[in-house]
Image (spheres, rainbow, N blue to C red):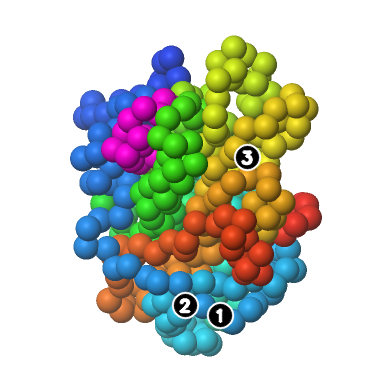
């Protein structure tokens, strides 16, 4: 199968920070406005959040396992969801191949996600997973998916970089008969086999509630986002703003430049922002990922500023930052769901009925009150990630 045609079906145009998509039929992709107001609640509900009929899965995993990347002890919180027996899958005399395309490289979230896939794959001796990583480049991800599809895999797992460029590709892969299972980040199509959603709305609402309470319902919040056009950037921006308007309309939200979700970019963007007049009256930071927030912490120290930070993600470093008082609160957002996605793919390969949409229920907000306990089950490592 050739996906080169899919690559030509969209033109991504950066215009004043807005990401626009022109498809073959001239439609605009949901969330195309980037950090702007272009993503409507209807578009987000239709494509970027879990459907109303999604099956909600509670975290019940308690058995520690060794992370194959960091060698740390971790707990897969959804290890009991959609169970698949250990051992060969399908026809025991046959080998099965799965492609896994990820959107980030050298990032604790993508490392944790990959680890959870690797842990599940190791339970099935006749299953091989071919890993692809785009290094934060949507065009490279499209090229890698083309390579993957040409190998005639038994299934494709995808953690898409951004909504607009990847939507036509995911749609075409599924229309061409591939088993396509997506996870966490989403695209603007319902053409897939299964998708594993995380509850960004609940996470953003919980942080908005906490910020509003701590600021007494008034003040100014600086929002620092991740990659423009990625579904987390779209929905976290939308839901945090939606909730804040509802409960604390006197709190103003201003936006910094976006980041690529990295600590280094967080430091760079925060340093530039803190040197500008816009930062003078800031009462808090709302950050789309605590990896970004770790960079903000260093920038604040360098600028000799003390501005409270509220963020999303709960790696060991993230939770340690809460425990140390450097971040006020984090909303847990686990990457340890790749095992669930792979089990869904296995079920589809075996011809079983597969849940189409799964939503992973979030854990409670992490503050200094519960950070010590949360650190015991957090993912990632307190040190540097091993080289990939």
Q: Which residue is mark 1?
A: 62
Up-down relation of residue 360 to residue 41 (above or below): below
Q: Identify the image quadrant of residue 304.
A: top right
Label 3 to label 2: alpha-carbon separation: 29 Å
Dot label at residue 293: 3
Dot label at residue 386: none
State yes or no: discs 3 and 2 in contact (Cβ < 8 Å).
no
Magenta segment: does it hold 34? no
Binning the other alpha carbons within 10 Å of mark 1 as few (below 14), some (14 to 19) or many (20 upward) gives some
The magenta segment is: 236-253
Viewer-closest of 149 and 80: 80
Viewer-closest of 356 and 11: 356
User: Which residue is drawn at the image coordinates 56% and 49% (left, top)?
Assistant: 329
User: Which residue is drawn at the image coordinates 25% and 56% (left, top)?
Assistant: 51
User: Which residue is drawn at the image coordinates 78% and 55% (left, top)?
Assistant: 383
Dot label at residue 60: 2
State yes or no: discs 2 and 1 in contact (Cβ < 8 Å).
yes
Give x and y (percent) for residue 330: 55, 51
Tell me if 170 is positioned left or right of 385 in this view.
left
Up-down relation of residue 141 to residue 152 (above or below): above
Q: Earlier in the sequence, mark 3 or mark 2?
A: 2
The secondary structure type at the circle numbered 3 is helix
Viewer-closest of 67 and 24: 67
Viewer-closest of 357 and 124: 357
């Amino acid at each position: 199968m050739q996906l080169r045609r899919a690559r030509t079906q969209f033109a991504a145009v950066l215009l004043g920070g807005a990401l626009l998509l022109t498809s073959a039929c001239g439609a605009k992709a949901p969330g195309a406005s980037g950090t702007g107001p272009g993503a409507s609640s209807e578009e987000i509900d239709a494509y970027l959040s879990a459907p109303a009929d999604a099956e909600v899965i509670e975290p019940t995993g308690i058995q520690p396992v060794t992370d194959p990347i960091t060698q740390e002890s971790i707990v897969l919180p959804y290890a009991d969801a959609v169970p698949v027996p250990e051992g060969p899958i399908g026809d025991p005399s046959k080998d099965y191949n799965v492609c896994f395309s990820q959107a980030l490289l050298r990032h604790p979230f993508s490392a944790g996600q990959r680890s959870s896939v690797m842990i599940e794959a190791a339970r099935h001796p006749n299953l091989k997973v071919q890993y692809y990583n785009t290094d934060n480049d949507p065009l490279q991800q499209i090229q890698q998916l083309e390579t993957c599809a040409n190998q005639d895999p038994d299934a494709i797992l995808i953690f898409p970089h951004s909504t607009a460029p990847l939507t036509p590709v995911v749609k075409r892969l599924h229309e061409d008969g591939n088993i396509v299972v997506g996870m966490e980040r989403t695209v603007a199509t319902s053409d897939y086999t299964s998708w594993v959603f995380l509850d960004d709305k609940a996470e953003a609402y919980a942080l908005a509630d906490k910020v509003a309470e701590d600021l007494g319902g008034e003040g100014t919040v600086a929002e620092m986002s991740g990659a423009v056009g990625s579904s987390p950037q779209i929905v976290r921006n939308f839901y945090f703003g939606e909730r804040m308007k509802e409960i604390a309309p006197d709190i103003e939200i201003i936006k910094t430049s976006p980041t690529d979700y990295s600590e280094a970019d967080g430091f760079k963007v925060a340093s530039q922002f803190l040197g500008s007049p816009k930062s003078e009256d800031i009462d808090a930071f709302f950050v789309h990922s605590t990896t970004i927030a770790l960079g903000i912490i260093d920038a604040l120290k360098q600028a000799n500023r003390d501005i409270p930070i509220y963020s999303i993600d709960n790696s060991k470093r993230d939770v340690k930052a809460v425990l140390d008082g450097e971040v006020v609160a984090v909303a847990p957002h686990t990457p340890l769901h790749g095992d669930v996605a792979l089990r869904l793919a296995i079920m589809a390969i075996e011809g079983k009925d597969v849940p189409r949409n799964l939503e992973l229920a979030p854990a409670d907000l992490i503050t200094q009150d519960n950070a010590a306990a949360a650190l015991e089950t957090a993912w990632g490592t307190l040190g540097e990630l091993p080289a990939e």
